[in-house]
């Protein structure tokens, strides 16, 4: 029996056309990884996005979901039997459009999740879709998954009508979400992500396990990230600035990156991004009390001395509960 579930209520994300190539090419999400481009000259080039050669040669502008479908499985469809004959016909832009039942144009090809189900059913493949809040929007499975094509299930994040492939390690988390989704236990709204608990952490030391660097503009991050990156272990970097984080956010969006934005006291206190094995944040020099008057610190050394004293002052006053 085929299993297919769409979002509850009147919100129908699976019926929306996905073709926004103007959106960010990279996004902050725990289960999305990008290789570090050590030849990058600006921030947007840091995030290595690899495409199949066929996709590069035939790329369709403003057709993100179609590009993703072809890029994910084109090489898998090149497999051959022991006799040397092909197992499948070549997966091309033309064949995907023909299977789904849409016109193959030079660009601007929008495909909804529901429309793409024809392709998944034909080749016995599955799909799971989540939003930026980690909530499932859509899921589909055929009667039996294909044992010869990998990945058997395409797992993607959809944001602003753009698709971002998730890492393989998201499989376990999405399996749990899928069970809840099928039981209609998830509502599609941001408020639903909030929970009430008796566990809390009021403050953590500001300088814990971070390399600290002061910057004036976004592109100052590039060389520092390239130099401090370690291919063997995770590295945490904190960039501090006296500039307006809203301006830096606009720079990031202009560079086609969607960061993790943290708010407090009605203003942005942190912009997070990750690339390779580097997890980084950009923060104001004093983010301890965003509702108070802004304190500007003019150097890395002053920042470290200030926050060391601040941490020592508050440490005995708060207990951390796990």
Image: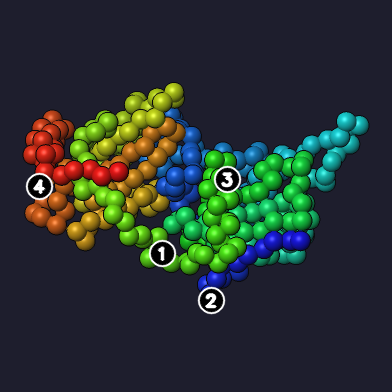
Q: In this view of the protein, can residue 223 be seen by the observer?
A: no
Q: Nearer the viewer, mark 4 or mark 1?
A: 1
Report the Cα–Cα distance between label 2 and label 1: 16 Å
> How far from the left and from the top, in percent, is residue 34?
48, 38
* Protein image colouring: rainbow
Of labels 2 and 1, earlier in sequence is 2
Q: Which residue is mark 1?
A: 192
Of labels 2 and 4, earlier in sequence is 2
Q: Are marks 2 and 4 in contact (CB under 8 Å)?
A: no
Residue lying at 37% horizontally and 43% vertically, measured from the top left: 273
Q: Which residue is mark 2?
A: 10
Figure quadrant of residue 115: bottom right
Of labels 4 and 3, earlier in sequence is 3
Looking at the rendered structure, the secondary structure element under dot 2 is loop
Looking at the rendered structure, the secondary structure element under dot 4 is loop
Report the Cα–Cα distance between label 4 and label 3: 44 Å
**Which of 303/197 is in front?**
197
| Position above or below: 184 against 218 | below
Q: Which residue is mark 4?
A: 295
| Position above or below: 195 against 231 | below
Looking at the rendered structure, the secondary structure element under dot 3 is helix
> How far from the left and from the top, in percent, is residue 125?
72, 51
Q: Which residue is mark 3?
A: 171
Of labels 3 and 2, earlier in sequence is 2
Residue lying at 35% horizontally and 30% vertically, measured from the top left: 235
Residue lying at 10% horizontally and 35% vertically, measured from the top left: 312
Looking at the rendered structure, the secondary structure element under dot 1 is helix
Report the Cα–Cα distance between label 3 and label 1: 22 Å
């Amino acid at each position: 029996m085929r299993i297919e579930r769409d979002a509850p209520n009147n919100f129908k994300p699976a019926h929306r056309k996905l073709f926004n190539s103007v959106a960010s090419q990279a996004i902050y999400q725990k289960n999305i990884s990008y290789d570090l481009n050590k030849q990058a000259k600006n921030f947007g080039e840091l995030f290595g996005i690899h495409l199949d050669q066929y996709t590069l040669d035939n790329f369709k502008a403003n057709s993100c979901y179609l590009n993703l479908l072809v890029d994910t499985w084109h090489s898998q469809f090149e497999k051959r039997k022991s006799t040397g004959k092909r197992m499948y016909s070549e997966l091309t832009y033309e064949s995907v459009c023909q299977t789904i039942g849409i016109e193959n144009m030079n660009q601007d090809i929008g495909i909804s999740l529901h429309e793409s189900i024809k392709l998944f059913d034909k080749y016995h493949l599955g799909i799971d879709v989540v939003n930026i809040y980690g909530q499932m929007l859509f899921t589909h499975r055929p009667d039996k998954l294909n044992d010869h094509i990998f990945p058997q299930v395409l797992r993607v994040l959809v944001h602003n009508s753009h698709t971002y492939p998730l890492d393989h390690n998201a499989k376990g988390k999405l399996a749990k979400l899928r069970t809840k989704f099928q039981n209609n236990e998830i509502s599609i709204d941001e408020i639903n992500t909030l929970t009430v608990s008796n566990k809390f952490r009021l403050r953590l030391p500001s300088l814990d396990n971070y390399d600290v660097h002061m910057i004036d503009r976004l592109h100052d991050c590039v060389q520092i990230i390239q130099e401090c990156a370690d291919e063997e272990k995770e590295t945490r970097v904190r960039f501090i600035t006296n500039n307006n984080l809203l301006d830096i956010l606009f720079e990031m969006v202009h560079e086609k990156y969607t960061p993790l934005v943290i708010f407090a006291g009605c203003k942005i206190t942190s912009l997070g991004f990750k690339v390779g094995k580097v997890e980084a944040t950009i923060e104001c020099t004093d983010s301890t009390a965003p509702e108070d008057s802004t304190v500007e610190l003019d150097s890395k050394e002053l920042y470290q001395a200030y926050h060391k004293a601040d941490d020592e002052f508050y440490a005995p006053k708060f207990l951390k509960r796990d």
